[in-house]
Amino acid sequence: MKRSASLWIVFLMVLSLVPAAKFASALYGTKVIDGNLGDWGTLDLVAKDKLGYGVDGGNLSSLYVSYDDQYLYIALEANNKANWGMAYGIGIDVDPDSGNGYTGTSDAWGRSISFSGNYAIDYELYTWWDDSQAKPTVEGQENVAFLPWVGDHWEYKTIGEVGGSFGWSGDSSVGLKTLEIKIPWNAIGGKTNKIAVIVWVTGGEGSAVDALPESSVVKDNPNEWGDTDYFTDLAEIYIVPKTIDGDLSDWAGYEVVGVSNLDGPDGADLDKLYVSYDEQYLYVAITTNNTASWGVVYGFGFDGACLVSPPVI
Ligand SMILES: [Ca+2]
Ligand SMILES: [Ca+2]
Ligand SMILES: [Ca+2]
Ligand SMILES: [Ca+2]
């Protein structure tokens, strides 16, 4: 009798879980690089356009990041209203907080894009949306540039030259719609514990007119095409398997999928629910706000249908 009452309490607590305010993550999963983002799930979405910054021909809407053992995958989605010639740039910081990397004021393609705060960019990727060809190009050819910062200058390569690839969609009415890229870990110094990623869009020169994660940096000057943009907000991605030891310090804030807003009974007071996975395991974790030690049962429920997307568990 007591047990069933306890179960009921836990059930109520789980029902009371509400989505966390900020939910962004990058989880293990292999993507097909074809410009179709149907193989990306909401768990891969690390930044989204909520404030509506951007211009008709350069309006970023979503940034996705995922990875597997061999590749880092990055995808972006634009929601343009016009077909303009625009440069789409991606910045990767493979060692946030270290200070290593580019912090100048003229980036790999000479744009006035700069980084500060905890971030110094180690790799940029760029492509020019050629509005007349209606394709993403580098020097007139369909391509994406891969540009490592090597201490005091940039190196100029294409994504194919380092073993990666790209896919895209778009047309001559709204320009670029999607760009999907895979980068071998060995092209960016090997798999690491934490990376930071940002995407922006600029014109033929000058600086950004939109970026993700969203930043007031693209809305702080009457001439956003011509100012210098100092980005300090990047999406941080943790790339670490979980150690199952009761210590949740290897879990990240973006893995919180629910927070209880109920003040539960002293010995049955759920706090947060975490979910993550890698190639072998699904991980779940909970924290409580218990102030007493009661005999209660903690139950987890899984609906298999939810495991279809993302597709690789
Ligand atoms: Ca795809
Ligand atoms: Ca760096
Ligand atoms: Ca600015
Ligand atoms: Ca700007």
Image: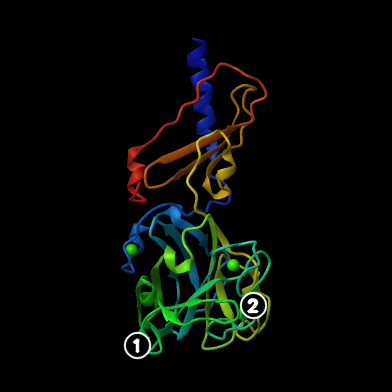
Position in image of residue 193 (x %, y %): 53, 54
User: Is 232 on the left-hand or right-hand side of 52?
Assistant: right
Dot 1 or dot 2: first in sequence order is 1
| Residue 121, numbered label | none
Mark 2 residue element: strand
Q: What SS does tag 1 mark?
A: loop
Q: Is residue 74 visible?
A: no
Residue at the location (64% across, 77% down)? 229
Find residue 285 and report its horizontal and vertical position in percent: 51, 36
Name the kind of residue labelled 2 in the image.
Asp
Q: Are marks 1 and 2 in contact (CB under 8 Å)?
A: no
29 on left or right of 265? left
Please state the horizontal and vertical placement of residue 249, each as a whole percent of the image. Answer: 59, 42
Q: Farthest residue toward the top?
A: 1
Check disc 1 and give the amino acid type. Answer: Gln
Q: Residue at x 43, y 58 (%)?
A: 66
Above or below 72: residue 287: above
- Foreground mark, 1 or 2, reads 2
Between residue 46 and residue 84, name the one nearer to us: 46
Q: Quadrant of ligand 2?
A: bottom right
* Label 2 crowd (10 A; few <14 / some 14-19 / many >=20): many
- Identify residue for label 1: 133
Residue at numbered disc 2: 229
Task: Please provide percent x and percent y for residue 306.
Answer: 36, 43
From where the camera sits, is residue 229 visible?
yes
C-alpha span from label 1 to label 2: 29 Å
Front in this rendered view, residue 288 or 119: 119
The reply to whether the residue tagged 2 has its Cβ within 8 angstroms of ligand 4 is yes
Classed neighbour count for the residue bearing mark 1: other residues with Cα under 10 Å, few (<14), some (14–19), many (≥20): some
